[in-house]
Amino acid sequence: MLHCICDASKPAEYLTCGNLISENGFMHLSRTLDFFVLILVQEGTLHICQDDRACDVGPGEFFVLFPGITHYGYKPSHGYLSYCWAHFALPGTPADTVKNLPHSVGIYQQARGLPLTDAISAEQVFLPEHGRISMEKRSQLLFLQLLDLAKRSSYQRTWSCRHALNLLLLEISREYLQAEHFGQDLLPTAVQDIIEWVQSHFDQPLTVSGLAEKFGYHPTYLSALIKQYTGYPLVTYINRTRISVSKNLLNSHSLTIRQISSMCGFADEKHFMKLFRQFEGMTPTQYRKAFDQKKINTL
């Protein structure tokens, strides 16, 4: 399957977007474009073929049309059809951003050298030709926001549209990778709420018993539930979140290790250093020096 892969540090260029609505019998034109097209179906089914591969794209599913490859409708839609679409270009050549991978997440993980849970949170756009997202998640709202911004600017290319597009691509990528990793529907709302709470309050005292009481779970069950969806018990997930934040703070020499430890929610500096070494294979000071060396080598 074809995949669109690019680093978020090299954002996509917004071209245009819109919303197609057909009462009955829509059939996509045959075209070969020199840019990407992202389609997210809201209602009905789009019957489309790309590179002679037929696909039926239903509600809550997305489809990516790739540059230089002919696509066309292979049969008319039956009944009402509505989908959002966005045209965008990526830096570099198609060979840099288009990959033909037999598997999605496994190959992605191997290529990045990351465990699955880290791969999902990586700041990278990773979109297959065809995938599924949750209509209750943020992607749907972000696409509508992009359409609204484009309409307000009379569909001109603006920085707001470009930023909205890249946020949309990252969110769809995250939702897709998450769904693929868990092999089921996306995170239940309750689990998502707990994860977002941890990510927003990592600098505060967090305990399994405290979170269990707040969200109405037995502590043992809550820890097992979080492990089911993240791969880590709740305590480990909290600590990994804090260590992840600390790595960004270590890039600044204006903060001491003690200050960073406190800012990340650790009451004990030695405990912070012990966990950092456990997760990263080096001390915070060694990490800071390694980062500085990397900056020197790239100058």
Image: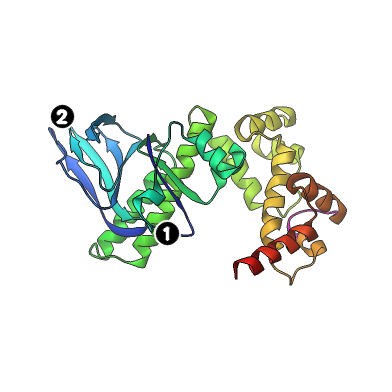
Residue type at tag 2: Lys
Q: Is residue 122 visible?
A: yes
Nearer to the camera, 51 or 85: 51
Report the disc number at residue 75. 2
Residue that badge 1 annotates: 11
Residue 186's x, y, as percent?
A: 49, 34
Residue 150's x, y, as percent?
A: 28, 60
Q: Residues within 10 Å of mark 1 (few under 14, many from 20)?
A: some
**Magenta part of the chain:** 263-268
Nearer to the camera, 238 or 33: 33
Label 1 to label 2, Cα distance in Å?
A: 35 Å
Please state, as top left, top right, bottom left or bottom right, where the N terminus lies in the image: top left
Q: Secondary structure at mark 2?
A: loop
Q: Is residue 217 visible?
A: no
Residue 201's x, y, as percent?
A: 67, 52
Total numbered badges shown on the rendered structure? 2
Residue 220's x, y, as percent?
A: 74, 28
Q: Is residue 11 above or below residue 71?
A: below
Q: Residues within 10 Å of mark 2 (few under 14, many from 20)?
A: some
Residue 40 included in the magenta stretch of the image: no
Left or right: where does residue 95 sit relative to residue 207?
A: left
Left or right: where does residue 208 sit relative to residue 148?
A: right
Residue, x 74% and y 48% (percent of image)? 280
Left or right: where does residue 108 sit relative to residue 246?
A: left
Q: Secondary structure at mark 1?
A: loop
Residue type at tag 1: Pro
Mark closer to the chain start, 1 or 2: 1
